[in-house]
Amino acid sequence: MTSLTLRNMASRKLRTALTSIAIILGVAMISGTFVLTDTINKSFDDIFQAGNQGIDVAVTPKTVAGLDGIDGPQLSMPQTLVKQVAAVDGVAVAEGSVSGQVSIRSPEGKAISKGPPNFASSVADERFTAFRYTEGRAPSTPREVALDASTFDKQGFRLGGPVTVVGAQGATRYTITGVVRFGDENSLAGASFALMTTPEAQRATGQAGRVNEIDVAGDDGVSPAELKSRVATALRGERVTVRTGQENADKQSEDLKKNLSFLRTALLVFGGIAVFVGAFVIYNTFSITVAQRTRELALLRTLGASRGQVLRSVALEAAIIGLAASIVGLIGGLLLAPGLTQLFSAFGFDLPSGGSVVQARTIIVALLVGTLVTILASLAPALRATRVAPVAAMREGLSEGEGRRRRPYFATLLLVVGVVLLCLGLFGNGSGGQAATLLGLGAAVVFLAVALLSPRLVKPLAAGIGRPLQGIFGLSGLLARENATRNPARTAVTAAALMIGVALVAFVSIFAAGLTGSVDATVDKSFTGDLTVMATDGFSPVPEGAQAAVAKVPGVGDTTAFRFSRGKVRGVSGTPAVVGVDPSVARTYKTTWKEGDNDVLANLGADGAVVDAGSGLGDKYKVGDRFTVTTPTGKQVTFTVRGLVDEGDFGVLGGGMVVSTQAVVEDFGVRQPGMIAVKFDGSRPAPEVRKEVDTLLERQFPNAEAQTKEELKKSQSDQINQLLGLIYALLALSVIVSLFGIVNTLALSVFERTRELGMLRAIGTTRRQVRRIVRLEAVITSLIGASLGVVLGVLFALLVSRPLEEEGFVLTFPIVTLLILLVLSALAGIVAAIMPARRASKLDVLEALAYE
Amino acid sequence: MPDIVTATDLTRRYGEGEAAVDALAGVTVAFPAGGLTAIMGPSGSGKSTLMHCLAGLDTPTSGSVTLDGVELSGLGDKELTELRRDRVGFVFQAFNLLPVLTAEENITLPLTLAGRKPDQAWLDQLIETVGLTDRRTHRPAELSGGQQQRVAVARALVHKPAVVFADEPTGNLDSNSSEEIQRLLRQSVDDLGQTVIMVTHDAHAASIADRLLVLADGRIVHDAPAGDADAVFEVMRGVTA
């Protein structure tokens, strides 16, 4: 029996190969994701190990759980602590180091990278750093810097030449005195570095008098653990964490892994979707194979093959295909990992890369997922195979039959379960992760249910789509439609595979359109200034000095800095966003008040706060109430509620709570603004003022840019579209898998209809007409899938946007995008039909008629 | 001679209510061991249904079938499968060989399914008898129709079944090949002592039988020694008239 299975597969190489592709792509995505993220982890682990090699003990500012993510502020400690540490018995050297994000400009004055960050760091004692000079020397005056070799070479800098670095105080020109490598590497995971003297690094990163880390080397004979406890004792009462060098490296690795886990999960989701779609293709292929082999299976049964033997033969085929496809997919994943990095950088998200890391886990997961999914998907067809009646071997001209049409209780139940899961995810109060899991599960179940129900929809949909085709192409259109509806279950599952990809694309595009619309509405409603100043990359902070400089431009009236942070409030879930504003906010911003007015915003003082009436804070506190916030620096600060804005109406300030600049700088440790709102005083024509602001920024703060309200809306929607593009690219994988499903189904159908096609050719149908019939059938199938997908996508969007409506989310339907999606699906169907159509048209008429 | 296959008061009804059709309307018949019986009858007479019921492929609506001492009614799928595998051989009109297996592999398929090894000497003898010694490793596609059917006959005999059912075994063959197959079936009865039950339309094929059963409208209308082809024609003319 085993060899029978193997030979059956060998005799249908093409079918086996096409079926395999359905699994290969998904597995490649999954294993590629693991390889990619493992590689990133590994390269950073190496970096952290190297960076902490000579450090016996490291002192860092204490972080607050939940507020120490990548969006948290950079924490620092007073420089005076360095002396305290140096005085500890057993400490040989203690050195404070400073590092912060800046913007290094190319010799042409442009930003040098879109993705990886630029850093300004203080020059460190050789034992505390892995930086080694390959050329020149360390900077010794405030106007000197050393650059990393990669940046130096790529940008064409020269030793002794100038380089401009834009820091917290604006652009500064330095002389390049040295070039460094990081250990054996030219760069540190793609990031660029400008090494400066400690005071200059403090100035450039806006951390005067403060350090980010204190590195300690001990006297001989003092163990790092011993030294750690002595330093910890000396610094008791300070908000710091003391670790050994090894612990510090481990902590840094762990933090990174936490940040990367989102990327990993996101990519795995796309891989999972592809595998899910692949399962439909597998299911369909096996269903058709079983149907076509009915006579053979019946013969085996007549000759005495038990049900178990039949089941095993089908399952074995699935297992072999699954395993082989997984192995190919795994290899594909290894090749894909660098490709993923490329994909991300094409969309402006650069990831570091190094030699590919393949863990045993990657191999196991890839093989297991691919093989199990294939076997599971083939289970139903395999069970159907066991129900083939032996007597079927005796019947002439047996038809595949439509099978028993059971009432769709199960599918309906499944649909209900799916919708309930979706609602639980949306309206339940689970954590973000739980909600996402519920949503994903719900969506998958809904897809399954619709796939099960869709055979009933095939006839009317095919009629709707096929009629115009029939009008255009006449008989070919009619035959294509009949062919598509001849076996509704087969067409339905083929279409359902495409439906999933299309539904997700439709959902994402509707959602993005809604998001863009909401951003536009938010800006229009709440921003009353003339310009905004933000970092050109859209997320970095604006240099601290920019506000004062812009304020001096004649014609500029008010400048309001918005500084963004987060805090924790006991009894309130999550970490509410905190925004610090200048008093001039009263003139550059407006909102709808439940209690209070803009004057309240202008007079917040050190402890005043305005909260969103609809948020967790607003639910709990009324005007006059006091509440305590834990800030990212670990401080406990008490604020008094001075005003309430209407639910979800903070507009450009985001959600949560608004406090004064003083509070956000001193208590939350945020020095640099995220955005500056500018209002002209009307003394000069606006375009002139705008031009002068632009000139100023270009000269002194080239990493920041001014935007009008319209430009701001545009740049925000550009960012959303950029992300959208990336998601489309990742979803394309699933769509490709489903296209292979169409190819497979068509190829099998053509094979099955050999005799009929031969008859058509014999009575005078041209090859071209035969091709057209197959092509139109593909178009009908893909349009059935696409229209179901669009409908589902719209329904998902309607559902998901419900809870967001309170936060100002406006659902809009990008009709044009959706229509394009349908057209593209039809085109994809035509592409999928190329090979099967050619086969059909090349049939030898006589052979086809004699075909047994 | 004990009876290998017996059917008692067999009815087989398809459909329900007014649309119901009785393919078999009370058939009682016994087949003693070691003989070749031809079953004939016009289309729709129930001859195929009778054979399917006798072979345990179809379940009669009422009545009972005993095959090699085993009462079929009440047997589950597993028992029926094993019964077919071990005690029944089949020859089909459409050959029904597996295209991916060689001639020899097709012949030994019933044994393979049962997980048994063929007795090599017996297999060699059988393959020689059907005249395929030089075709053992050929695939069905490389064989003529007659050769394919000879493979099928050998397959039906390889496990020395209690009874061989042949369903229009010569229906798809030219006259030369037909004769070969008829000769083989005759030989299996005469030389090997097989019991063969054959459904056929072909008076020539029926004429090699020891006994001729004719069905019409689900009933046995003729049961007598077969005689030569002309005699068979005569009988059939009487039935269809």
Image (spheres, coloured by chain):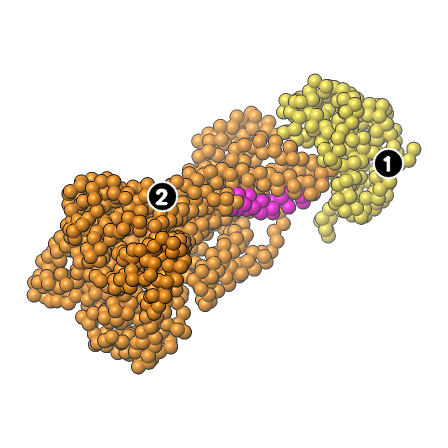
Q: Colour of chain B?
A: yellow
Residue at 45% x, 55% y is A792
Which disc number belongs to residue B4? 1
Q: Is residue A263 left or right of residue B82?
A: left
Toward which corner of the image does residue B217 lie, by quadrant?
top right
Percent position (x, y) of residue A524?
24, 64
Q: Is residue A734 magenta?
A: no
Which disc number belongs to residue A353? 2
Q: Chain of mark 1?
A: B
Decide if residue A455 is in sight here: yes
The secondary structure making up most of the magenta span is helix
Q: Is residue A693 above or below residue A27?
A: below
Percent position (x, y) of residue A703?
20, 53
Identify the amino acid type marked 2.
Answer: Ser
Q: Is residue A598 left or right of residue B81?
A: left
Q: Residues within 10 Å of mark 2 (few under 14, many from 20)?
A: some
Decide if residue A714 is in sight here: no
- What span is in magenta? A365-388
